[in-house]
Each structure stands twice: as C-alpha cells, then as structure tokens.
Amino acid sequence: MKPVHIEDLLAYRFLSAVEFAPDGRLAAFVVKRADREENRYLSDLYLVDLGSRSVSRLTSGGSDGPFVWGGDGRELYFLSRRDGEDGDEPALYRIRVDGGEAERVATLPHKAEALARLDDGGFLYTARLAPADEDAADDAEDYEVLDEIPFWMNGEGFTNGRRKRLFRFDPASGESAALLDPELEVTGFDARDGRCAVIGRRFDGVAEIVRELWTVEGAGGPATRVPIEGWALDEVRFLDDRTVLATGADMKTYGLNQNREILAIDLATGRVTSWTPGWDRSVGNSIAADCRHGGGPTLRVACGKAYVSVTDRTTGSLVEIEGAGTARTILEAVGSIDAYDVREGRVLSIELRPDRLQELYAYDEGEETRLTSLNEDSLADRSVAIPERFGVPSAGGDEIDAWLIRPMGVDPEAKVPTILTIHGGPRGAYGEIFFHQMQMLAGKGYAILISNPHGSSGRGNAFADIRAQYGKIDYEDLMAVVDTALDRYPFLDAERLGVMGGSYGGFMTNWMIGHTDRFRAAVSQRSIANWIHKFCTTDIGYYFNADQLGTTPWADGGSDRLWWHSPLRYADRATTPTLFIHSEQDYRCWLPEGIQMFTALRYHGVETRLVMFRGENHELSRGGKPTHRIRRLNEIAAWFDRHLKGDAEAG
C-alpha cells in the first residue's frame, strides 16, 4: 500500500445536493471533479435508482447544477454554463431521466445562483444585481465607489450597492420579474403552492445582522413583511399555508454564535414558537474537511415534520422534530453528514468517514446501504491512518477531545516530527473523517495532532463561548493537547514540533509563535493578526469583532483590548520560522493580516515566507482552483520538511 500523495486530490469526487424525486423512486445529486488542464472543477448530475440501486451519470456538460425536479419526477431542470455558448449567464436546461440529450429551455437574463420550481411551471432564482443608476461610463471598471459596509464579501468581490435579489422566471413568456424591494438583500427563500417565503437583510450604510421575513403571493403578487423583530434567521421552509419553520437565534445569551433553534413562525401574526425549547445543539455540519465541494440544506420539511442536521461533539446527526419538544435523533453518522434528504421514513445521506471519501448512503428503518462507489478507486491502494481519540484535561474543567493521526512508513522505534493542526471558526470542529491534508502529511512521516478546544462547536453554547477570551483558554487547551500527547505517545519528538491552522486556526498559529518557542516551524493560513485592522477592512469584522471581543476600537479601553488580543502585538517575541499563506481576494481575513505578520517577523530577523494566491479567496484550501490547492500543499510540506526534517533543499 502507498501513502496518500498530494496530487491524489485531483482524482477525488465531491458529492453534494442530493434530492429525492417526487415519487421517491429515484434521487439525483451533483458530482464535481478536478480538471487540471482547465484548472477548474467539472460538475455533472448523477442519478440513483433506489429500487435497483444502480447509479449513472445523467449529464456531461461539466458545469451542470443547481437542479430541481420536474413535477412528475421524469425530468430535471438545471442551470449550466456549457462550453461554446455565448455570455457568462447560465442557461436553464431540461433533461429526461430516462435518457436523451439536455434541452435548452432559456437563457436567463442574470447570473443565476439558487433555483426552485413553482407548481405553475415557473421558476425562482437569485442573482446579484447592480443598482439601476450605477454609472455605466466606459471606465466604470477602473474604480469602485463605496458608501456602505460591508462593501465586499468573500467569494463575491465588491458588492457595494449590489443586492442579491429574487426573480420569478416564466418559461412561457421567457421573462424574468424581480420580487420584493430592490434594497432587500435576499439570503434565503422557499416556495409552496406558488407562495414564497423570503429571508433578507437591509443596508442603511451598515448591513443589519438580524433578518426580515417576507411573503410574496402568487406570480409576482403582493409582498407582505411578517412582523418579527430581533432574530438572526438562516434557512426557511414552509410547514403549511400558515406557518414556516426557520433556523434562527435571538442572540441574547451567547451573541452572534449562539446555537440556532428550530422556530415555527405564524405568517399572519409573526408569533414565534420554538420547536426546540432548551435546545443546545450545533445546527448544521461544522466538521472541518478539505474533501467536500458543496453541500445541501440544513433544514427540510416533510409530512409535517422538520428534519435538521446537527453536529454532535465530533460526528454528524440527523434529527426529526414533530412539534415543540419532540426532537429525536434518527441517524448518527460514522463521520459527517454533508448533504441529506428524507422521504417517507427513508434517508439519503452524503457522508465523509474516517477511512473513506464521500459516498451516498441510504437508510431504511435503520438499515444502511452504500449506494455509490465513486471514490472507491481513489484510495484503493492507499494507506489511510485512522484518527485515534484521546482525552485532555482542560483548565476550564472539561475534557478536550483530541486525536493522533499516526505517521506512515517510519521506524516504530524512532522519534517522529509532530504537527499540531488547529481548525477554523472558532465554532468549527474536527471529527473522525478522511482529511486529505492530514493524510498527506502522515504519509510523509509526520504525526498529526488535532483537537476541539473551548470555542469549538458540537458541545453546547457554554463550551463554545470564548468571547473576550481569544488567546486565553483556547491557547491553554491547545498547549495541554501537546503536553498530553507527548506524555501518552513516547515516539512523538518534543524537539521537532510544528503548528499550523487557517482562519481562526491562523489566528491561533500567529498567537502561539508570539507566546512560546516550543514549535520549530509554523504555517499560518488566511490568518488574523490585528483585530483593529480586521474590524475596519473585512466583510464581517465590524460585527464579528465587536461580538467576539466585546468591544470596538472607540469604546473606553476598546482599542487596548483589541490590541491585547492581537498576535501582531507579540510578534517581536517570535522566533519560530513561519510560512504565511494568503489569498489575494480573501475578504474574510484580508491579505494585509498575513502581510502584517510577515513584515513584523522579517523586521525582527525571523525566517519567514509569504505565498499569495491570486484569484483565490478564503476557501482556497477547500474550493480553490485545483493547481492552486496542489501548490499550497506542496508549500506546506516543503516548509515542514525543511524545518522539522532538516531537508535543506525543501522550500
């Protein structure tokens, strides 16, 4: 058996967006794969016959999806930008599931994203539009005019004044009509019997954190705002004609990151009732991974019941809810639930597992069946190290979940270099799933330590609440993980320790090199260096920093507190050789965050290197262009080879 190699990533298949057909006989899902020559991902639609359990590729356009089922389940409608067609806007296609070529229905007038089908044959989609009065001068692309925050968004570029709007498309007339106020930014929607429920936010110089809920009657009929106030809402689904269910929180106790509840909202009165009173679970999939590309809804409604995916400590679960206080777990996954659908007691689930890449599974009365083998060949001759869990006492009184991923192909009696890896978030989590980056490093002879310190999701609000504690209890937890692992596993080399992380993990990496000299090498990715700077420059900084650090630069003592929590403040103490990896268009943790730390270390004589990827954003490690992801992994491996193995030629 061979170790996992960096370029194995190019052979993986990424599954997402599974949906039952209306009659439940079939299901469709999206499969993406890397195209190295074109340096992009190809996306096609697949079908599974749930009777024969046969799986087939339905489309081969290479840019197919999102999709929706036709009303009779005999055809799929999907968006696609197929080669050889004019324009950047996607066209709407239709294809029969019993075979034949895809038929072009219409070219939409906008760059459509989400797609839904109405019972009358019309479609809903979202698209980001510039304001009608935007300057159309010949040199308009040479400048940006900013008058609101955020003025850009990670993955979308400059968005100042450009709202994501909801449109209704009528195939008969070929016309698209905008719904709702043009100043409302649509963040989620659902449709039932021609009626729409829409979640949105407003900008009045500063984008609101709370959301509005609207309904639109019929084909572009009257719009009505539902009278609710003060809720952060994420997803919405119709329960019946009078009620919608939504994931949301009032943020009163634990702030921005408070665990979401399942809320029933009366559309006429705005009355909000929690279906999950006392709920303290992490809604959605927050298990970190680099082998998924897309997902699916967190909340679904079927037969009067709500279904929601949650992260329970280190694994994914699916919960069924039928009215207030009736939550019951119907599926406990071996790893993560990356997408799912439910129909008449059956569950379809796309999952990542400890020794396996994504595949599609069916559950019928608790019996599991694996339906796909799309990634079977990718790891057929590869050795995969299964994470070994161990507990770590925390200064906060909790036991921290931690894992060791053993190195491959090394002398069992030899001391091995060890890399502490820190997840993002902080409300993310590691779990027992296949993680390409870690398996690659294990294949190169490194032991990998991962853990879920305070701040991580999956263990309730109190455990995750580290507001105003960044660099305190989380740092103590992570150092305790290192100490416990060194005591527990004598083959780990305390003299050859590395540390790495991205986003919040990049913040912690920057923090660590300014607070300890125990690490011989570090890799800091899409990181945070200066909370004051991040507050004023990033797409979430103005509200995320205020919530998580509990202050603003202008509050009494606020700038001192933000500076105290900033790794840049301690950069003059750093001695650890550090590689910084950042993306030019990362507006979540903007490029100057990495540049500031790089400059500070270089100024103080510390060996450092910064690699910037053009055309990439905060998602480089998970969804960046294939060759960029390969280059990133090569940079990381070479840096650690040089500093932890003494390979002078590396890097």
Image (cartoon, grey):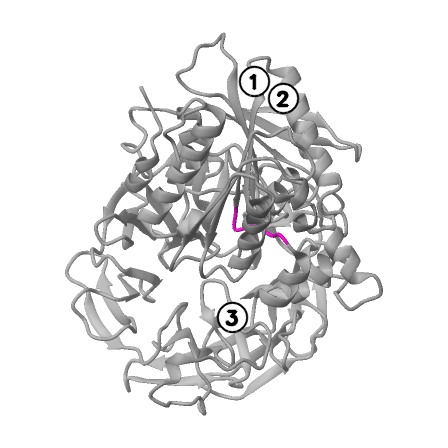
Which numbered dot is residue 485? 2
In the image, what residue type sits under mark 1? Leu
In this rendering, the label closer to the viewer, 1 or 2: 1
Q: Nearer the viewer, residue 399 or 140?
A: 140
Tell me what residue is drawn at x 59 percent, y 84 percent.
224
Can you give x and y, in whole percent of width and height, for residue 373 in the image? Answer: 30, 36
Mark 1 and mark 2 residues within 8 Å of each other at the beta carbon: yes
Query: Which range is magenta?
Result: 525-529
- Inter-mark Cα distance, 1 to 3: 44 Å
**In screen coordinates, is 324 left or right of 611?**
right
**Residue identifier under label 1:** 492
Q: In the image, is residue 85 above or below residue 64?
A: below
Q: Residues within 10 Å of mark 1 (few under 14, many from 20)?
A: many
Please name the residue shown 63% across and 82% down the image.
Answer: 204
Tell me which label, 2 or 3, sits earlier in the chain. 3
Label placed on residue 97: none
Q: Which mark is residue 152?
A: 3
